[in-house]
Amino acid sequence: MQRTKIESKQLDEERALYHLTGADVTDCTFAGPADGESVLKEARDIAVSECRFSLRYPMWHVKGFSMEHSAMDELTRAALWYADNGTITHCELGGIKAVRECSHIRLSDCRVHSAEFGWKCDDIVMEDTEIVSEYLFLDSRNVRLNRVQMQGKYSFQYMENLEISDSTLDTKDAFWHSKNVTVKNSIVKGEYLGWFSDGLALINCKITGTQPLCYCKNLKLIGCTMEDCDLAFEYSEVTADVHGHIDSVKNPKSGVITADSVGEIIMEDAVMDCEGKVVLRKRSESTAC
């Protein structure tokens, strides 16, 4: 069946291309005085290229799509919701809530500035992308990030099955209440990292920020460094191999923390039994708390 081609048009009416199926949309502008919503709602099997969006809710319930070399500005509110099986490449995504309750989506070589991005999604891959967001990927499942530069706060909370590699995360309160998260070869900056997580593994990572990794279950650190990290591991079940210095460790619940040096080991005012050990690699000493 021959595909429909829509090229070089300006469209601003409500549901301008509603339920468009089997089509290529190229060099179009979705903006104008009519200020219509949902221009591509319920579309099927569409390829969007070199388009510009400045209208609300443009791609809801879209199934089977690609979007490349396109831009959604800050007025493109809640751009992709309930979408399935799509690729987004070389795009700029602005506007709050750009992706929500979507599944099987691949993003690569994008720039994203969207508060509340990626909530309640499943099977998302993001690669070679810069993103600024708050509560990034809240309550999502089965997400992979590779070579991502992220800035924001409250990221990756209530997530399950998350893999991050070769990335830089500048965020506070990351990974709270998350399950089965692995971060490899990455820089993780921010306060209060990973509280209440279960199954968080940090491998060959640089960790920076106060009071990290408290109240954790099944926590693992392998080959990591920790800078400006004080009051770490409070009430956590942890196995940690840290290269270099930790400013202070407080009341680890169980497990072994190995480091080259620790500024202070605090064993006081615990509200539960704490039997974790700190092993100082250079001096072969251990202290139980």
Image: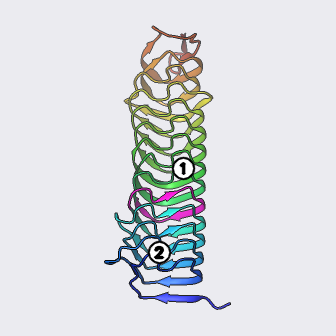
Residue in the foreground of this view, choosing between 207 and 200: 200
The residue pinned by badge 2 equals 39
Please report the residue visible at 57 percent of the width from the left and 66 percent of the height from the top: 61
The answer to which of marks 2 and 1 sits earlier in the sequence is 2
Furthest residue toward left: 33
**Relative to 163, residue 92 above or below:** below
Element type at mark 1: strand
**Horizontal and vertical percent position of residue 205:** 50, 40
Residue 245: image location, x then y, percent: 43, 26
- The quarter holding residue 74 reads bottom left
In the rendered image, the residue lying farthest to the top is 268
The residue that label 1 is drawn on is: 165
Query: Taking 123 as reference, is 34 above or below it?
Result: below
Classify 10 Å Cα crowding around label 2: few (below 14), some (14-19), many (20 and above).
many
Does the magenta portion include 280?
no
Percent position of residue 285, x then y:
53, 13
Q: Residue furthest right?
A: 1
Left or right: residue 145 versus residue 72 is: right
Amino acid type for the residue under numbered disc 1: Ser
Quarter of the N terminus within the rendering? bottom right
Distance CA(mark 2)–CA(mark 1): 36 Å
Please state the extent of the stretch shown in magenta in the rendering. Answer: 95-112
Near-viewer residue (284 or 155): 155
Residue positioned 46% across, 54% down in the render = 117
Residues packed near mark 1 inside 10 Å, few (<14), some (14 to 19) or many (20 plus): many
In the depicted view, which residue is nearer to us: 224 or 269? 269
